Amino acid sequence: MKKISIVLVFSIMMIISLCACGSNSNAKCTPDLNKSFCISAEIDYDGSISEAKFQRYGKGSWDVEFLSPNTLAGVVLSFDDTNVEASYKGLSFSVPKSALPLKSIISTFIDTADKLADQPEITGSEKDDLIVTEGEAELGKYEISFDKNGRLAGFEMPNLNLVIKFSECADNITETTEAVTQPASESIEETVFSEETEATVETQNTEN
């Protein structure tokens, strides 16, 4: 009987220890966001993959340049507080942030990152050597992850089947002048801003 009790106590202690190691809900880091930076992103939105470069100039001021696929390559979305301007090869026009799900999703990420940039420290769960903090925005719940140095690692919105993975973070923003040989601007505009684009998110303020 004494042996059984010892084994039982040991088993309980092992279970508690494994649970504690599996997820640390008190992990902390200082977000490395309150500055200008450039970071590469792989965006998986409901199975569609695109690559982009995110540049932050300051709070509310971001540029997002798409590198792929071909139908989006060269398109730049410039966010300035409540306005967003889309441009491609010199053609630019202003549209509401909520005009399309893609811009709404990026806007949600930008708002989240800017809010966290003002915080001296964030607390979250430690998963796979990353610190993950959760929240909820107008479009739904999100998870944003950082490495232990406070650098962006990812952004997810499970209800939208969205996963963004960040890499190659650089503090100094550099301008690229590579030529883009892609479809005509008219087709780009149609792809990004057409009202017929399939979406899983209802948008408001659809006036151009």
Image (cartoon, rainbow, N blue to C red):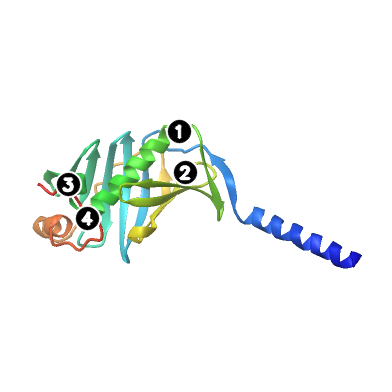
Q: Comparing marks 4 and 3, which lies closer to the viewer?
A: 4
Q: Is there a contact, CB below 8 Å, between mark 4 and mark 3? A: no
> Earlier along the polypeptide chain: callout 4 or callout 3?
3
Q: Residue at x 55, y 56 (%)?
A: 128
Pick the quarter of the image with the N terminus.
bottom right
Q: Is residue 158 left or right of residue 186?
A: right
Any mark on residue 151, and which?
2
Question: Which residue is labeled 4 in the image?
Answer: 202
Q: Report which quarter residue 186 is drawn in.
A: bottom left
Q: Residues within 10 Å of mark 3 (few under 14, many from 20)?
A: many
The residue carrying mark 3 is: 86
Provide the residue designation for mark 1.
Answer: 119
Residues under labels 2 and 4: Cα distance? 31 Å
Q: Is residue 131 visible?
A: yes
Rounded to the nearest angstrom, the CA distance separating label 2 from label 1 is 14 Å
Q: Residues within 10 Å of mark 1 (few under 14, many from 20)?
A: few
Percent from the top left, x then y, of residue 72? Answer: 21, 58
Q: Residue 191 at x, y = what percent?
A: 16, 60
The residue at 36%/57% (across/down) is 42
Amino acid found under the numbered disc labelled 4: Glu
Residue sitting nearer the eye, 141 or 174? 141
* Residue 39: percent from left, percent from top: 37, 46
Helix, strand, or loop for circle 1? loop
Q: How many marks?
A: 4
1 or 3: mark nearer the eye: 1
Does the CB distance between marks 1 and 4 fall below 8 Å?
no
**Whole-number angstrom distance, CA of label 1 to CA of label 4:** 31 Å
Identify the secondary structure beneath mark 4. loop
Alpha-carbon span between mark 3 and mark 2: 27 Å
Specify whether 130 is left or right of 21.
left
First in sequence, mark 1 or 4: give its number. 1
Going from the N terminus, do you reach mark 2 or mark 4 first? 2
